[in-house]
Image: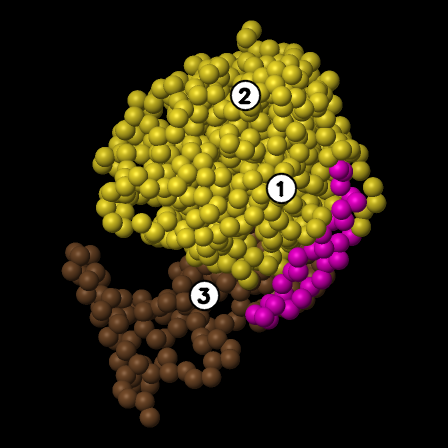
Chain colours: A brown, B yellow
């Protein structure tokens, strides 16, 4: 635990110093460290958080209603087509836009992160839909999109068109705690950055 | 015709993910033969003269390659003959240059004054390489910085089909809708004109045509409900000279008293409005993202028009003029001279934007000034370019969506069994949405009299779906799944005799041939494959004489030029992508056959053969 504490502290200083040098007055090292375990300051997309204590997971309370909700994914499927999401993302496999049925998420794959992407848009071509589609519908589309890469949804594919029978999104699907070694990792030295290994 | 459901199986790939297998080919008895559907107004009369491109449109070869089509006639013929069938086996790579962009590279390298110019896929870098120095060092690089969001309105990968050099300028388009002229000496912009608007879904991917003091440009966006147009800019200033829409009222299409279409169906007032449901022409496509052709001899500009939008034809009853056809215009003021519609009320995404080759050809006992157009709908059209009359129309790929072209009315004869339907899948439609051939340009050799067609052999299943128009988003409305055509080879290079109206030879390729061809004075045809082979074939026999494996699949336009040392060089860009290659260049999942507008269904195995890349290769004999 002591090494973890040391590393966090060192990174906090490293981040703070250039900020001070650039004349961003008022952002001391202490201030950055104090802001660390942020609460509800928006949905965080990055798994990279300076320091080793992952606090990246935020929970938008609005998301809760769309987990374990079969109606939401069914409705989302309909809206996904109506709002031309399918024009770019096809039946989940992508085309003009990226695939949504694999486990790679450029801007985060939790339900709330998908919702955030729909609201804000993304610079490489994803339109911004906030204020253009009712928020409830954006959450339903998000639930459908989150469902596309679920094992249950993938298993329901019977032909060349996937995502026709979307499974509800279980709450457990998004209960990760930020970046962690992937399943199947047999040796994990990532948490120990200092000192010789035995 | 009897249709059969292709067997679709889900298999476990080596990675453990579910991967779609390539469907079974469409049976050969489901397509029509050339004898059944090919038509011409006259029997072949080769004795009337030799097929050539006129000197005005194809001047004597100076060894340069200043425009993608090589010359206005668009022959893509290099008269250089140092390379021959006898010595081509010794051809070897001289240099390669990474383009720094791993997306589909469709451009032709340009060679002028011993400098080579290359424009990449988005973000549309332009490189100038000094051919007089060993290794062709970089003279300059220009980064136009198109807005990144333009990637989101590019239907089929973020490609660019090239630029041209004229009067000290390199002129090209950017994905976000700009036309830019660079000073060839410095790489600095001389002018920069914005023509497109990504917020309505517009992008530009075509290669501008520079002729007669003007730059001719057209827009992309046929899958996003973008109204198609062509525009002419002043070559010196970039200022707009004229702009003509391809749908809408006559005054906006630039149709006036001088418009003399050959067929009655194109005559009338405001047909670009009347052949659509109310206001549908405003979001009706008809874009010009392929090849415009300037005719120096007749002082005409020919350009095709893209598919009507949406793909779901049930939402737009009518002929949908002026989509999926070809215009002849006055290049000076844009006014239309004639129009011919290859595919009225298109139901299968058969854009009319492929290349036209301007030839003087024997037909009906005399020499005629024709353009040869190889359409997505599968026919080789030989058209009298003085008036727009179709002289012959013959299938060069698998066709069952039509039963030939009625040469009295000019209209294709529809096959009701292959007409698309709302909510119902129609199986085994040939050719597929991307056509018997897409944008990839053919070449013509005056020595052999043959046209070397790079093409596809792909069919499809199609179901119409209701779609809403939302500006800046796709407006398609079809669920498409492509599959190989008869025989299973998804591509071919075919040597076509336009006078005898038949193929002389054909090379089968596993994947669609999405590169252009170039033919040389040494009777060699060069082309690339999507699995990364660059090949040379004997132009008379089709025998593959040489091949070289490059870093990524090839979908670009090869060229042949004379270096500063007087030797013949061959250059091509690698970098797989485009609509057919989105499965590799884009983040597309092979488990979704409908992905990339249905192309993934027949290309799910491509990632086993190639990876994304982007490299210029130059080849020469050892010397």
**Which residue was labeled with disc 2?**
B360
A58 above or below B257?
below
B345, A94: nearer the viewer? B345
Quadrant of the image occupied by residue B111 = top left
**Which residue was labeled with disc 3?**
A58
Residue A161 percent coordinates (x, y): 68, 55
**Which residue was labeled with disc 1?**
B505
Q: Chain of mark 3?
A: A
B540, B581: nearer the viewer? B540
Residue B215 percent coordinates (x, y): 39, 24
- Whole-angstrom CA distance, mark 3 to mark 2, is 71 Å
Residue ranking furthest to the top = B257
Residue ranking furthest to the right = B2
> Which type of secondary structure does the marked residue at label 2 adopt?
strand
> Which type of secondary structure does the marked residue at label 1 adopt?
strand
Q: Chain of mark 2?
A: B
Whether callout 3 and callout 2 share a subunit is answered: no
- Whole-angstrom CA distance, mark 1 to mark 3, is 64 Å
Q: Residue at x 79, y 45 (%)?
A: B29
Residue A74 seen in this snapshot: no
Residue ranking furthest to the bottom = A198
Query: In the rendered structure, which segment of residues is drawn in magenta?
Result: B5-33
Q: Residue at x 37, y 79 (%)?
A: A190
* Badge nearest the viewer, 1 or 3: 1
Residue B319 percent coordinates (x, y): 68, 24
A10, B619: nearer the viewer? B619
Residue B44 seen in this snapshot: yes
Look at the image and say whether residue B612 sits in the magenta stretch: no
* Badge nearest the viewer, 3 or 2: 2
Residue B180 percent coordinates (x, y): 34, 32
Quadrant of the image occupied by residue B402 = top right
């Amino acid at each position: 635990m002591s090494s973890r504490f040391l590393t966090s502290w060192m990174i906090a200083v490293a981040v703070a110093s250039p900020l001070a040098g650039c004349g961003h007055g008022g952002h001391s090292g202490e201030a950055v460290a104090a802001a660390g375990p942020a609460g509800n300051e928006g949905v965080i997309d990055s798994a990279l958080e300076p320091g080793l204590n992952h606090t990246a997971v935020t929970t938008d309370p609005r998301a809760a209603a769309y987990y374990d909700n079969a109606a939401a994914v069914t409705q989302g499927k309909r809206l996904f087509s109506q709002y031309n999401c399918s024009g770019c993302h096809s039946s989940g496999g992508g085309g003009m836009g990226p695939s949504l049925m694999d486990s790679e998420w450029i801007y985060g794959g939790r339900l709330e992160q998908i919702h955030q992407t729909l609201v804000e848009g993304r610079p490489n071509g994803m339109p911004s839909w906030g204020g253009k589609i009712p928020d409830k519908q954006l959450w339903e589309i998000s639930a459908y999109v989150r469902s596309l890469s679920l094992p249950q949804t993938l298993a329901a594919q019977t032909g060349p068109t996937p995502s026709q029978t979307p499974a509800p999104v279980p709450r457990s699907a998004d209960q990760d705690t930020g970046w962690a070694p992937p399943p199947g990792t047999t040796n994990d030295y990532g948490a120990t950055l200092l000192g010789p290994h035995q | 015709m009897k249709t059969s459901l292709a067997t679709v199986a889900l298999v476990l790939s080596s990675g453990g993910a579910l991967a779609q297998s390539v469907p079974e080919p469409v049976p050969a008895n489901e397509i029509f033969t050339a004898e059944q559907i090919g038509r011409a107004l006259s029997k072949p009369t080769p004795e009337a003269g030799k097929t050539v491109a006129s000197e005005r449109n194809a001047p004597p070869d100076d060894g340069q390659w200043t425009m993608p089509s090589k010359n206005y006639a668009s022959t893509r013929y290099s008269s250089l003959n140092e390379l021959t069938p006898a010595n081509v086996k010794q051809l070897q790579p001289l240099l390669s240059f990474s383009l720094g962009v791993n997306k589909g590279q469709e451009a032709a390298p340009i060679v002028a004054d011993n400098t080579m110019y290359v424009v990449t896929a988005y973000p549309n870098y332009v490189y100038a390489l000094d051919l007089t120095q060993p290794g062709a060092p970089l003279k300059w690089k220009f980064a136009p910085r198109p807005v990144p969001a333009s990637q989101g309105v590019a239907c089929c990968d973020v490609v660019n089909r090239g630029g041209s050099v004229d009067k000290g300028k390199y002129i090209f388009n950017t994905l976000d809708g700009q036309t830019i002229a660079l000073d060839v000496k410095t790489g600095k912009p001389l002018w920069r004109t914005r023509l497109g608007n990504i917020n309505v879904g517009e992008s530009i991917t075509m290669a501008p045509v520079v002729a007669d003091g003007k730059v001719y440009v057209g827009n992309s966006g046929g899958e996003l409900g973008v109204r198609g147009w062509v525009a002419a800019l002043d070559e010196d200033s970039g200022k707009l000279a004229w702009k003509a829409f391809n749908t809408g009222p006559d005054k906006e299409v630039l149709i006036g008293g001088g418009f003399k279409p050959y067929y009655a169906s194109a005559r009338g007032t405001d047909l670009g409005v009347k052949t659509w449901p109310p206001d549908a022409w405003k979001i009706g496509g008809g874009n010009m993202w392929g090849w415009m052709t300037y005719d120096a001899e007749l002082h005409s500009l020919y350009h095709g028009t893209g598919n009507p939008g949406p793909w779901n034809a049930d939402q737009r009853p009518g002929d949908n003029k002026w989509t999926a056809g070809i215009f002849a215009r006055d290049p000076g003021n844009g006014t239309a001279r004639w129009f011919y519609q290859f595919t009225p009320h298109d139901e299968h995404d058969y854009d009319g934007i492929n290349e036209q080759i301007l030839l003087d050809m024997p037909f009906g006992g005399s020499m005629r000034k024709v353009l040869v157009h190889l359409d997505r709908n599968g026919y080789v059209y030989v058209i009298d370019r003085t008036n727009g009359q179709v002289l012959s129309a013959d299938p060069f790929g698998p066709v069952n969506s039509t039963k030939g072209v009625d040469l009295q009315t000019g209209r294709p004869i529809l096959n009701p069994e292959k007409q698309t339907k709302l909510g119902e899948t129609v199986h085994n439609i040939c050719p597929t949405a991307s056509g018997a051939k897409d944008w990839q340009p053919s070449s013509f050799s005056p020595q052999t009299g043959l046209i070397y067609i790079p093409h596809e052999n792909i069919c499809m299943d199609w179901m119409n779906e209701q779609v809403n128009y939302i500006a800046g988003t796709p407006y398609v409305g079809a669920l498409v799944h492509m599959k190989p055509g008869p025989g299973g080879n998804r591509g071919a290079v075919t040597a076509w005799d336009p006078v005898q109206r038949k193929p002389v030879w054909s090379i089968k390729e596993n994947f669609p041939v999405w590169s252009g061809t170039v033919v040389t004075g040494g009777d060699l045809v060069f082309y690339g494959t999507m699995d990364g082979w660059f090949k040379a074939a004997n132009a008379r026999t089709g025998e593959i004489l040489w091949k070289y494996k490059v870093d990524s699949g090839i979908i670009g336009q090869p060229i042949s030029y004379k270096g500063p040392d007087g030797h013949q060089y061959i250059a091509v860009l690698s970098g797989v992508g485009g609509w057919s290659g989105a499965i590799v260049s884009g983040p597309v999942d092979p488990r979704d056959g409908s992905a990339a507008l249905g192309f993934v269904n027949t290309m799910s195995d491509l990632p086993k053969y190639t990876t994304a890349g982007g490299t210029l290769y130059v080849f020469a004999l050892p010397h």
